[in-house]
Image (spheres, rainbow, N blue to C red):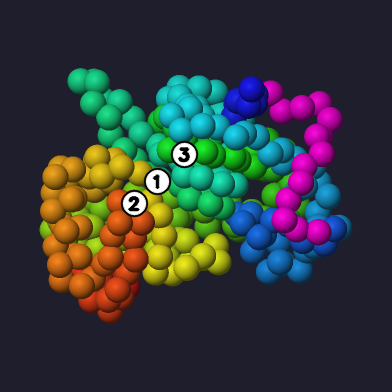
Amino acid sequence: MSRPFLSPFPAKPVPITDDGDEFTFCSSCAFAGACQAEGYDKSALQELHCLVEHVGPYHAGTPLFREGDPFNAIAAVRSGTVKTFRIDASGREQVLGFFLLGEVIGLDAIHNGRFPCNAVALDTVSLCRFSFPMMATLATRMPGLQAQLFRLLSQDINKAAAMAGDFSADERMAAFVLSIARRFACRGFSPTRFVLSMSRTDIGNYLRLAAETVSRVVRRFQDEGLLRVDRREFEILDLPRLQRLAQPVLRD
């Protein structure tokens, strides 16, 4: 049985494995770039390594935390995709975001000390779980780590705000596809070919579009030569046109 995301942090750190070595952290780690930029290596950051534990795997549909649960940790996605969502007063689901390899979930719980939303695994998910009280203490001695936490918070805010404008279905869908592609590319994957774990219904919910609208826009993008799509496999064929469509949303 997999260990729950919110399990108490162990009294003694448990051994973990990664794709690094004695000097470097996992290539997918959300904090690796900050550590390298500051000139730190693993030998100088044993404290950071000791306050992380690998948890999972969690199978598709497994809740990782629920709205109102006490907050004591953030987690970086080590594999798979995580969806965050709320349930409104009428019992309807509102998708807030999707988190890919190396991205951090739980940052929006820092202020109130409780998770403001739910998180669920969309496929087989494993996580690197960081004790937030211990990380916050370490960050006071590591400006680079502290700055990275601020950057991650800023990214969360910007992603949430990006879809808030009055954009067309084509603009929203183009921005979504391009954003996913860029996020995969940042982790060393193909910038034009990827697999989406989320359903058309989830995508539509996130973009505030009907699932039928998402399917219709995707078909039109295929007909116009922007994309090649096979079920959940996407390939960008015309990046400049997709960028022009997405520009009002992404503003770059």
Dot 2 or dot 3, earlier in sequence: 3
Q: Nearer the viewer, residue 189 or 132?
A: 189
> Is 113 on the left or on the right of 83, as rendered?
right
**Residue at x 85% of width, y 58% of height:** 22
Is the C-beta separation of discs 3 and 1 under 8 Å? yes
As shown in the figure, which amino acid type bears the numbered disc 2? Arg
- Image: magenta residue range: 8-21
**Residue at x 55% of width, y 32% of height:** 58
Q: Position of residue 35 (x, y in %)?
A: 71, 61
Q: Position of residue 157 (x, y in %)?
A: 40, 50
As shown in the figure, which amino acid type bears the numbered disc 3? Asp
Secondary structure beneath dot 1 equals: loop
For disc 1, the marked residue is 197
Q: Is residue 161 visible?
A: no
Q: Quadrant of residue 137?
A: top right
| Outermost residue toward the front in this view | 230
For disc 3, the marked residue is 123
Closer mark to the observer between disc 1 and disc 2: 2
Q: Residues within 10 Å of mark 3 (few under 14, many from 20)?
A: some
For disc 2, the marked residue is 232
Question: Magenta stretch: dominant SS?
Answer: loop
Dot 1 or dot 2, earlier in sequence: 1
Is the C-beta separation of discs 1 and 2 under 8 Å? yes
As shown in the figure, which amino acid type bears the numbered disc 1? Ser
Q: Nearer the viewer, residue 112 or 86?
A: 86
